[in-house]
Structure formats: structure tokens, C-alpha cells
Image (tube, rainbow, N blue to C red):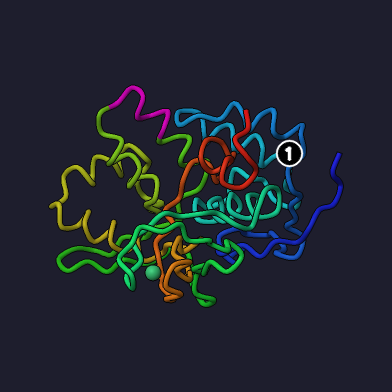
Amino acid sequence: MNDNYLPITLPSRCIPYEGIDPDSVKIRSYTGADEVFLSEINILNQTSKFLFILERVMQGIDPKILTSGDKLYIMLWEYINSYSETVFEKDICSGCMQEVSFTVDLRKMDVVKLPKDLVLPVEVTMEDADPVFLKLLTIDDELHVQDYAATHPDSHLYKLARLMVDPKLDLLERKAWLASCPAKVLAQIRGKFGELYHGPSFSANVTCPGCGREDVIEVPFRFEFLFPTGETLADTFGKGI
Ligand SMILES: [Zn+2]
């Protein structure tokens, strides 16, 4: 058992978590017992399985209320602290124009934080309508959206409705309201939601091993940030099982 819980500074700054002391939020790196569950993760069950793992490794917060941005940051934190701070990313160097394998130090990846003075819910001013108020997407929302999507075709609207805060309308009423709105209203809501992104930047400063040129490359989120397998495992630890 790993009892070495470390403080973690989340990109949300804990602004969305009422009553949670940011100093009390702690995390530990994975153990073999956690890997049992990590190894069972696949594309379909990743949110629920990862939540289960977060419940094992985190203290000071109910992981269900974590924002999706904080979740991504925690995935990266766990990769760095449990496996390796380095990943290898193949890309074309803009200096020598060759495909090279860049060494990426994940510890140096920029993290986008929520603005310190952010007030939730966030007001979205509309050009031709009353303002709409938004909250941030959480792991709990992700699970609900996933369940809903399994049996309904309009999960796009359901997801936006979950993000809306309106004490006068319940969830289904908000969804019906969105369905009746001009698409432009939804575009403004989606645009504002995008502005609230917080979490890893998924871009990194790298040096070309061939010509030495310094560059910034995209390091897209990949499934192996949860649990290294395949090439990610092979690059860092050997071919593996
Ligand atoms: Zn180069």
C-alpha cells in the first residue's frame, strides 16, 4: 500500500468545488493493486473505471465532482509520477523536415489554469436573447452523458443542457429550450465553454535530435496516458506484455 499522499495543484484551482480546501486535496501514485483496474480500462469504460481508480488514489475531494480538465491533468500527473516523465512523439521537424522522434518532458508541459477571478456559473451574453449561465463539465456529467447517449440520439443537446444553470428549468426543459433555439445560441454556448478549458496544454517545447532546432509540437492526449501499453510502453520500458 502506498500511503505517500502528495498535495496536487489542480488547474481549476478548486474554484468549482464549494467548501473544498485546495490544500487538503491530495493524491498518491499508482501501485500494482491499482494497475489491476487500469489494465481493464478500454475506450468504452474509461470514465467509470478511471473514477473508480481516482476514488482509490485521491483524498480531500469526491472525485465525481472533479472537472474534466482536472481529470486530464490528474491522468498526466499519474503518468509522470507512476510511470515516466518522458514520452516520445514522432513528428516532422520544421528545421530539417525529417520525421524524428522527439523526447517530450511531460513535467514541462504548460498547464492552462482557470482565471483566478472566475465566478461560477459563468454568464454567456447572447446577441438576441437573455444571458445563459454555465457550469463546468464534471466526471459525473461525463458519466450521465455517456449513459444517456447509449439510448438517445440527442446527447449533444443533453450535454449542453447539463452545463446550463437555470433554477427555473429542469434538465429536460433546458434540453427542450436548446432544441428550440437558433443554432447560433448553441454555438455561443459551445464557444464560451471552450474558453473555460483548463488542463494540460498538450503541446511541448522540444529539440530535434537531428538538427538541434527547438520547436513546439502537439502531444495529443492518448489512451496510453492512462495506462502505458503498445508503443508507449515499448519506447519507455521495453517491449513488454
Ligand atoms: Zn531537425
Q: Main SS of the magenta segment?
A: helix
Q: Position of residue 54 (x, y in %)?
A: 66, 42
Q: Which residues are magenta?
A: 146-152
Please indicate whether residue 108 sits to the left or right of residue 162 in the image.
right
Q: Quadrant of the C terminus?
A: top right
Please indicate whether residue 24 sits to the left or right of residue 223 in the image.
right
Local secondary structure at mark 1: helix
Q: Position of residue 89 (x, y in %)?
A: 46, 55
* Residue 147 magenta: yes
Q: How many labels sit on residues?
A: 1
Question: Is the residue marked 1 within 8 Å of ligand 1, measured from its CB?
Answer: no
Quarter of the render that holds ligand 1: bottom left
- Residue at the image position 53 percent from the left and 62 percent from the top: 104
User: Label 1, on which residue?
Assistant: 56
Q: Quadrant of residue 158?
A: top left
Please indicate whether residue 153 sits to the left or right of residue 139 in the image.
left
Front-most of 125 and 130?
125
* Residue 234 magenta: no
- Residue at the image position 15 percent from the left and 66 percent from the top: 128
- Residue at the image position 28 percent from the left and 58 percent from the top: 189
Front-most of 10 and 182?
10
Q: Position of residue 91 (x, y in %)?
A: 37, 58
